[in-house]
Structures are given as C-alpha cells and as structure tokens.
Amino acid sequence: MSVETVVMKFGGSSVADLEKVKEVAQIIEQRKKNMSVVVVVSAMGKTTNSLIDKAYNLSERPNLREMDMLVATGEIVSASLLSICLNEMSVPAVSLTGFQAGFNSYGKHGSNKIEDVDVTRLKRHLDEEHIVVVTGFQGMNPEGDITTLGRGGSDTSAVAIAAKLGAKCEIYTDVDGIYSADPRIHKGAKKIDVVTYEELMEMAHLGANVIEPRSVEIAERYGVEMEIRLNDGVTPGTRVVGGKDMEKTTLTNVSKLDEVLLVSMSDKTGSSAKITECFLELAQRNVNIDIISQTIVNDQTEISFTSTEASKHEIEDVLESKEIDYRMKTDVSKVSIVGTAMRNQVGIAAKVFEIFLEEDIRFYEISTSEISISYVVDTENTTRVIELLADAFNI
Amino acid sequence: MSVETVVMKFGGSSVADLEKVKEVAQIIEQRKKNMSVVVVVSAMGKTTNSLIDKAYNLSERPNLREMDMLVATGEIVSASLLSICLNEMSVPAVSLTGFQAGFNSYGKHGSNKIEDVDVTRLKRHLDEEHIVVVTGFQGMNPEGDITTLGRGGSDTSAVAIAAKLGAKCEIYTDVDGIYSADPRIHKGAKKIDVVTYEELMEMAHLGANVIEPRSVEIAERYGVEMEIRLNDGVTPGTRVVGGKDMEKTTLTNVSKLDEVLLVSMSDKTGSSAKITECFLELAQRNVNIDIISQTIVNDQTEISFTSTEASKHEIEDVLESKEIDYRMKTDVSKVSIVGTAMRNQVGIAAKVFEIFLEEDIRFYEISTSEISISYVVDTENTTRVIELLADAFNI
C-alpha cells in the first residue's frame, strides 16, 4: 500500500447507540481522506452484558464454547451497522468477523490468545480502497470454533492488526487521553501527553480502565505507534512511545481496580503440598492470580492471593477439590501508584504507610513492582485513598 | 450412524423468549432418547425485525452484504442460547453457524440459494453423540461472505440438512399442522393429516404462512419425509408425502398473502420494448414477480403485475430508469384456493366470480395454476373473502 495505514479502535461506549455510530462514521470519513483505514469495533454499549445475562438465565455455568459463539455476535452487529452507515455516506466499507479478518487463536474459551493474524484478505480490501471494519475481541481456533479474547480484547485485536500491517494504532475512548488519576474521582488530575509502553502497561494492569495490558505488550514488541484519543477525532490524545529512561521525576498515575477477590488459605500440617497443587491447577485453568503474600502466625502459614470476583466459582471449585481451609473476601479494590520515577525514589511505601495510619485506613495486601505499589483496601474507601495519594505525591 | 436421525426445525415464535427456549430444549431432550438429533433454529421472536430497523435508521437502502452480516447474528444468538440450555440439562450440544455447518451458497445477498451442504463436520459431532444446533437461514458464498437465504430460509436449511443426512425433517410451529383455512380467520377450518408435496408447495407460495415453498421443493426432490408439528412435541401434525394422484375430491385450502404490491404500466407507442427490458432488469435483480396480466383498452395495452411491498423501491428504480408510465397500488392481498381437486373440477372460477358479484367485492387480478386460483383483493376484504370461499366450497 502506498498511503499510510491507520487502525482506529472504537470501544463500546463510542458506539453505544445509533447516533454515536453516525458520529464515529464521520470521524472515520475524515481520516480516510489521506489514509488507508482499518476500524476495530467493540459491541455497542451494554450489548455484551445483556447477552451474558441471557446465558446465565439459562445456566448457572454456561458452556464456555457456546458463550463465545453467543457473545461474539455483539461485535458483528456493531461492525455491520457501522459499515452500513459508512456505505450510506458513499464511503465504501466492508465488515469482517474475527475469523474473516484472519484471527487465528488458541487457548481457553473466553480468554483466547492470538496465534497469528493472516491479513491477506484484509489487505485485499484495503487495496480496493475499502475501509475494513473488523469485529474486535474475537477469532477462530484450530477446531473452527468461534473464540473471544476476553474482556477488553478489542484493544488487542487493533494492535495485532496494526503490528501486522506496519500501521499506527489509535485507541478512541470517552476521555481525551491518560490522566495522572481518574479525573472523575480526583479533580486535580492532569493529562499526560506522552507515556512509555512500560508505564502504560502498569497502569493498564492496575485498572486505569483505559486499555488492555496485553495490547500494550504487543505494541511494544512490534514497535506499534499508539495514541489514546478522545472520540471527537480532533483533540490530541496521549501518545505511547518506547524508552525506559525518560527524564521523569514524578509519579504519573494513581488508579484503581474494583471487584477484587481476596482469598486466604491456612496451611495446616501437610497442606503445603496441597496449596502448591492448588496454584498449579489454577494456572492450568487460566485463573488470573494477582498479588500473592504469605505470613506466619503461631507456626501456621497464612497464604493470601487476589483474583477477580468473576473467578470466584472456579477458585471455589479448585480449593474445595483439594480440601483446603479457605476464606474469601469481596467488596475490596486495588489502588495503585505507578511511574518510572518509582525506581529512583525511596520512601514512597513508607509515606503511604504513614498516610494510612494517620487516616485510619485499613489495607489487606500490599504489592510492589519496579514501577508501582498497590494496596488492597475496602472498596468504600477507594475514592478517599486516591484523593489522599494524589495530594501527597502531587500527581 | 446406526440410529435414525431427525432434523427438528424451530421457528422464531417457538424460541421467542428464554422460557420458550427452555421448553424447546425439553422437546429436544425427549427426541434425543432414541434418535440422533440436528436442530435448526430461527432468530428469537422479533430479533430480525429489530436488527433491520436499526439498519434502516442508518441508511435508506442498506448495503445488502452488510445486512446479511447483521441479520445472521439473530440465529447465532438463538442457537448458542439453546445449546447453553441443553448443556445445562446435561444433554451435550454444540451450535454451528451456517458456515460452520457447511452451507455453501450463491446468488444475491439477502436471497442466497444453497449450492450444497458439506455435512462432514455435522456428522462428526453427531458421531460424538452431540446434538447439533444449526443456525437456520444462512450460509457463506465463495467470496467467504456471510449470506442469508431470505425470509423463512430456516425451513430450507432444515430440509437441506435432512436431505444430505437421509434424515426425516420435523417443522415445529405454533399451530398443530396444516389447516384447510387459517383457523384464526375461519372457525370451521379442519386439520389436514396428510398432504402432498405439490399441494403444500402451492399453499406455501400462496402465503399459508406455514412453510417456505423452496424447502418443500427440496423435500420432494430428495424424498425427505416431513411433518409439520405443534411445538409441544406431543400432538401429531400434518405429514407431507409424495404422490400426485391421491383420491381427493375436495379443495384443501384457502390462504392469503398480505402486503402485495400491484403495479400497472401503460404501453404507449414504442414502449413495448421498454417494458420487456424492464422485466429482464427486474429478473436480473431477483425481484420476485408473481401474477402478470395484460388487457387492451382503446388500442392501448395495460400490463399489470404483482410483487411484494418490500420490493417497491427497487421496482420504482427500474421503471423510472426506463421512463415507463406506471401506477402502484398497496393495501391489497392475494387470496387463493388450492387443491389437487382443482384439476378434476370445472366451474370453480365461475362460482367465485358469481360470489364476488353477489357480494360486491372487487378484485384486481386473477391467476390460475393447475391446482390453484388466486385473486388480488383489497386487504380490508380479505377475511370476508376467505369466509365466503370456505363456506362455498365446504373447505
């Protein structure tokens, strides 16, 4: 292709209703004037949740293969409607399902991973001057079954296509970029113009709710130029770039993740082997385990870990099959401070401990990485904790 | 396969909501006890119409390829939900899209025809003792695009699978079989226990609203044993059998088709060639033309034909491009009397003329086939006409 190609990704809130679909079509039309355009869309608004509700009405634990088949229709509807709208505007467009767009995937239904994207067909449509509207979040496995890449997988779809086409990738959303804290919670939050892949990945993992972390990993690996933009198509957003040693002296972000599940297990005599088996089994089932910590009280080892509320049933299954003594806690959230500055500064954890003590805020877990610190706190305290941390560190 | 196979087809009203999906799953479970089962489903209730409305909100004439992509999701949702429900009942089931079920199709988007059904995958799932739930009404063309077989195409899907598997085909619906007239309109209507393919085909073409005529053609060609059944899974329905010379002495059915479009064209000097071009163009565009008639008044030829209201725009396009002088009439319906008895009896048309005259009912067109007579009348008169004809011919 002689002209530059851009992959534009629109999430569910950007195409929540037919009026918004029309607005998105206009943004795309502008972009098409001097670029070759691939669009990746999520399902409209609450469509996915509504489909999931129907399945749970019929079954307590719906068959996962069938769930993928069901849920994948959400993106097919939004992609075809957007394409209908573009064609009405005399902008030739063609919509493709994940399978038609060449997404070969593997793994567990509901959280498939992309093996490869065969962009042959996609390129053919681009060569014919068509806008290609691809359903995000889905693919097909070697058995020929429809799969989904898990929640937020549309970002991953978009970046994967951009990587294969050597295109830039624009993630459109309802905020105009990445902020130092959630602007709805902390009024003083500042927009960040440039962020590194690494920082963005930490923010994503920590629930900044802006982008799927896997997609940032792929972007970094393939050097895909990314931008997080407001879906007005005009306002400049936050650019995502490479580099680990940007001269930054402050922390960049405070974020939170809700619906955390906190699990505590007691390691009585002989159960240590069982707990190891347990983690192996959970890993095999692709259950996401986040923070793991261990304390010893009166010769008894207490092991805790966090996961998501959505994994509750599966974790119960595993723990009960291994006859482990456990407790679960919900209504907790994870609040995190992120920034490359973290690795150059000392005393951040200490300062946070001080704040929590002064303000009498309880936390259940702490976890640190090279560029972040996270705390598990009661969900009802989340807003106050974000305010306190943002103020304390001038974020 | 050692056990007998049955293809069970459930229309949109049979799976209109989640409660009905559960009922259908129970009927299937019963059948599975001693048979190998393939299920073909339509979209739930009003889903298809709701998707079409969305498209028309975005475009006056939605791109047909994209419409197929959009509309096909309706059946994917009902098939996967039904499969989730069956699996919940510990009845192993797997849902397949038209493409996955091997439906290769060709022709115009929105009214594709089945080239062939490659049942390899379907048979594999049956061999594994799975119930296979296939999305009706859809396939994939040689370009790899999703296609639909047109309204009512689920019947065709079901019969096509039955033909390829050498299975029997059961069409489940909200009436317990074929009636001599619509029981909602004519109280004295009688259920028919056995009907020939030929008679059923006439009834279907004439809008008895029970089954798609194309499906009956395929059933006849491949000798597929069919039954039209109430979706309670218990009541015996109407069996469809071969044979043209059944000893019947009465007419079997009065039926109606609403939303007919009546088009009249005036053939002024020199426009006869244009009218011929017109019919060629309409045929090329796959516009369905039903009754054609011609009269000559004062040296001027009047040609009329009927089609469906849905084809109005397309017909206007063609007639205007050929600069033909035309008039259109809507709010008319076609009422038909059907039966193999027709060919052995004389005077039926005469008797109908007499009734229409006596009752002062106007009709716009008349058409006869070997086993039917049809009249185009004002829609508001339809119920009265059916009553009168049913009484007159003791149907």
Image (tube, coloured by chain):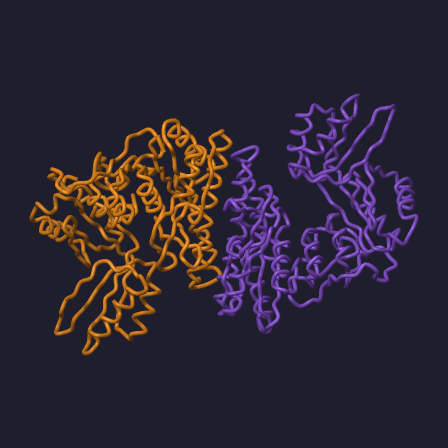
Chain colours: A purple, B orange
Is residue A395 something that shows in the picture?
Answer: no
Which quarter of the rendered picture does the N terminus of chain B lie within?
top left
Is residue B126 something that shows in the picture?
Answer: yes
- Residue A363 at x, y percent in the picture: 83, 38
Q: Nearer the viewer, residue B192 or A28?
A: A28
Which quarter of the rendered picture does the C terminus of chain B lie within?
top left
Q: Is residue A169 left or right of residue A139?
A: right
Q: Which residue is drawn at the image coordinates 49% and 29% (left, top)?
A: B90
Q: Residue furthest top?
A: A269
- Residue B133 at x, y percent in the picture: 43, 40
Instruction: From this view, report whether residue B12 is shown above or below residue B34.
Output: below
- Residue A16 at x, y percent in the picture: 58, 54
- Residue A222 at x, y percent in the picture: 68, 59
Q: Nearer the viewer, residue A194 or A65?
A: A65
Q: Which residue is drawn at the image coordinates 44% and 51% (left, top)?
A: B72
Q: Residue furthest bottom?
A: B269
Q: Is residue A291 left or right of residue B368?
A: right
